[in-house]
């Protein structure tokens, strides 16, 4: 449901006029009318918060209708993502330092390229990072054969 439709629906359910809601939320009636008619493309979070408070509803209802990310929305996205990845793997990765996570990602991407016969995969989020060889040289482009060395601490 679009933001304007959501505001109008909630306002109608509460039996408020635009004028009453405008006064209660410290928003002009003209601006509220523009919101309800979908003429405002990016309303500020502050305005949405005041309108929600005036209607005594959870502000997330309006934030989500406006396309703003909310804690509830992000939690759902995370839960959906988490359920597709093995829990033990997530715990293992979370305990690795960031540089080792990146190195492991590069190794996995290289393995996937070998398995796919060099074809590009569509889910590669970014180009591979430059690799440092054992001698500290930076390689670019196609990854050279990796020498796994123990990380020095």
Image: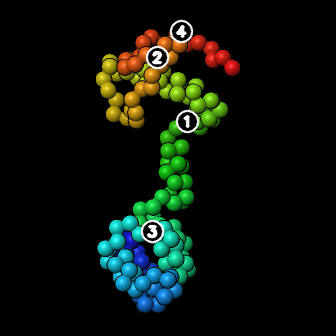
- Residue that mark 4 sits on: 135
The numbered mark, 3 or 4, whose residue comes first in the sequence reads 3
In the rendered structure, find residue 138 and report the number of the disc placed on it.
2
CA–CA distance in space, label 1 to label 3: 39 Å
Closest to the observer, 113 or 85: 113
Q: Measuring 34% from the left and 78% from the top, which residue is drawn there?
A: 34
Report the front residue among 132 and 118.
132
Residue 86 circle label: 1
| Residue topped by disc 3 | 44
- Mark 1 or 3: in front is 3
Question: Residue lying furthest right in this view?
Answer: 153
Percent x, y of residue 46: 50, 71
CB contact under 8 Å: marks 1 and 3: no
Q: What SS does tag 1 mark?
A: loop
Picture mark count? 4
* Sequence-earlier tag: 1 or 4: 1
For label 4, the crowd category at 10 Å Cα-Cα, with few meaning under 14, some 14 to 19 and many 20 or more, is few
Give me the C-alpha separation between circle 1 and circle 2.
33 Å
- Closest to the camera, between mark 1 and mark 4, is 4
Q: Horizontal and vertical percent for residue 5?
A: 36, 76
In the structure shown, which secondary structural element does the residue marked by tag 3 occupy?
A: loop
Local packing at callout 1 (Cα closer than 10 Å; few below 14, some 14-19, many 20+) is few
């Amino acid at each position: 449901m679009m933001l304007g439709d959501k505001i109008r629906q909630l306002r109608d359910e509460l039996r408020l006029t635009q004028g009453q809601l405008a006064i209660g939320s410290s928003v002009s009636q003209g601006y509220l009318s523009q919101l309800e008619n979908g003429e405002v493309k990016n309303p500020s979070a502050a305005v949405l918060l005041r309108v929600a408070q005036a209607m005594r509803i959870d502000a997330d209802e309006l934030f989500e209708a406006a396309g703003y990310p909310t804690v509830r929305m992000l939690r759902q996205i995370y839960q959906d993502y988490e359920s597709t990845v093995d829990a033990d793997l997530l715990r293992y990765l979370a305990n690795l330092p960031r540089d080792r996570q990146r190195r492991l990602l590069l190794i996995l991407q290289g393995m996937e390229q070998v398995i796919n016969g060099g074809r590009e995969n569509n889910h590669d989020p970014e180009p591979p990072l430059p690799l440092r060889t054992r001698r500290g040289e930076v390689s670019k482009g196609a990854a050279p054969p990796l020498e796994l060395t123990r990380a020095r601490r």
